Image: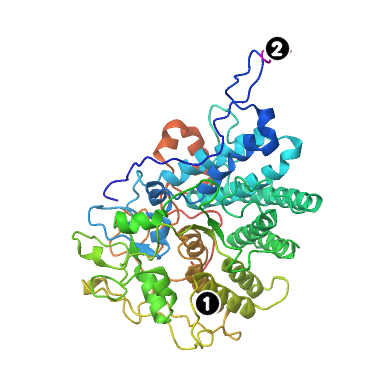
Amino acid sequence: MKTIYKKNRILWVGLLGLLLSSSCTKNFEGLNTNPSKVTQAQAAGDFQYIGGFLPDMEENIASPVDYTYQVQQNLNADIFSGYMSSPDYGFGPNNATYFMRYDWNNQAFDTGNQHIMNNWQQVKALARPQDQHFVAIALILKVEGMHRVTDIYGPIPYSQYGTGNFFVPYDSQQAIYTRFFNELDTAVNTLTAYVKANPGATPFKPFDLIYGGDYKQWLKFANTLRLRLAMRIVYADAATAKTQAEKAVADPNGLLSDPKNDPALLNMVNGLSYQNALWNITNGYNDICMGAPMQSIIEGYNDPRESAYFLPSVYNSKFEGIRSGLNITTAEYTQFSLLNVLATTPMQIMSSSESYFLKAEGALRGWNMGGGTAQSFYEAGVTASFQERGVTMPAGYLTNTTSTANPYIDPTNASNNILAGDPTLNNITIHYDATASFEQNLQRIITQKWLAIYPDGEESWSEFRRTGYPKQFQVKENDSGGTISTTGYVRRLPYTTNENKVNPKGVATGVAALGGPDNGGTKLWWDKNPNH
């Protein structure tokens, strides 16, 4: 990120600029109506007055704008997850070396408020009784967008956002997750009733960048999201996790499961045109490459998805990852493996294979996942991932009982190597062994899940913090000043400079709810795994 490029970009946001005409008196309504503006009554027929807020919510779950995405996710979660690492030798101390760059770490918070919460407020305010199906979609997008934000920072303004108070207090993360599940209840019930009463209707189609207005797909997405969030809190509230997970699986609307039709992708439809953010960050900025943990695991498994994810290094025509947390002072690492992504590659919001791994973990825990075993769901998830990527799974891949992660060898500096016997080197095989311990099979499930949901570093970083899998290499250089343990890894991002300036009393309530200092080493509410 030699600079964060400010580009002119036309964002498709529907008719967000429409002014809702109102009159001073009933008698002078005509005099007070601007004839050049579309009124709410005129726009109501095609839902422009409310639907136009939703595409902006979809676009900002993970922004397709490169300079936004870079500091929203790429220079934190994508690195902390082990997927990627930066070759840039001009950064100096930064997130990768545990020096929390406040100028990098504001974006996820700001984007969530400006594009998710603000648009939600507009939809909620404008909705008529007959518009509740739009409110349901906005609720699902709100939960999807803001669970990422709370999983980055911890307590955030949520229930009292937009109330107009002198300061906005923060909700505890436990309270936020309770609201998430309740909001998903409302959304699923509303959409289920709408689909039943209006078979084949697609009023959201002119605005939907993900599923083309298909409410049945959104119901699957909502159920899968519920299952994801249920699993997230399993070490903090096991009873609620089980209840919500079983509820998600039991819903007759189903989960995302079809590798071809179900993945949630930000498509270039309805006037939206963009270049995949990772394409420009890796090719234009040359600021991100393959991470060393990814190279170690995917090559240890001889997994052909490697070439679907990354390009060979021009350094030596091999795949080369970079160990995170290095003090990079020269340009040598800029020749390592770039991401295999095109400008036209859709931004990924959620894969269909994720649902299988969630059910596999649920079955491993003894929950009712609707039939099937942990092994059958695990194998279905691996199979679905290969199909999603258009890669043929090698014969014998699922029955491989010997392959584990490779040692990591840095071809430019041997002091960065991770050799056999290092405790951070992943030691789990591919073949599911029903006789193995709970932890061994959990490690298998999460490791393959990690491979499957790439490049979603946000979700993978959360899963690493929750489970400790797949194992991550420790940073070579720790510039945190003791606030983040080298063996404990980054657990969150500190609150933003802007919030500390404009809402200091609110931030104080957040820190109190956090239960620890406002730094990168404090664990979140759900981060209670006794083994990690």
* Residue type at the position of mark 2: Thr
Q: Foreground residue, 22 or 153?
A: 22
Q: Is residue 133 above or below residue 88?
A: above
Outermost residue toward the right in this view: 197
Name the colouring of the figure: rainbow
Q: Foreground residue, 287 or 378?
A: 287
Q: Which mark is residue 358?
A: none
Quadrant hosting residue 282: bottom left
Question: Residue at position x 73%, y 34% from top?
Answer: 128
Percent of width and height locating residue 247: 73, 61
> For numbered disc 2, what is the local secondary structure?
loop
Outermost residue toward the left in this view: 330
The residue beneath circle 1 is 444
Circle 2 packing at 10 Å, graded few (<14), some (14-19), many (20+), is few
> For numbered disc 1, what is the local secondary structure?
helix
Question: Residue at position x 69%, y 11% from top?
Answer: 28
- For marks 2 and 1, the one nearer the N-term is 2
Question: Residue at position x 47%, y 80% from top?
Answer: 428
The residue beneath circle 2 is 25
Q: Foreground residue, 347 or 78?
A: 347
Q: Is residue 252 magenta?
A: no
Quadrant hosting residue 309: bottom left
**Region of the chain picked out in magenta, as a range:** 24-30
Q: Is residue 366 above or below residue 253?
A: below
Q: Is residue 29 magenta?
A: yes
Q: Is residue 365 above or below residue 525?
A: below
Percent of width and height locating residue 140: 63, 49
Q: Is residue 125 visible?
A: yes
Left/right placement of residue 70 relative to residue 450 reads left
Left/right placement of residue 273 relative to residue 16 reads left
Percent of width and height locating residue 11: 47, 41
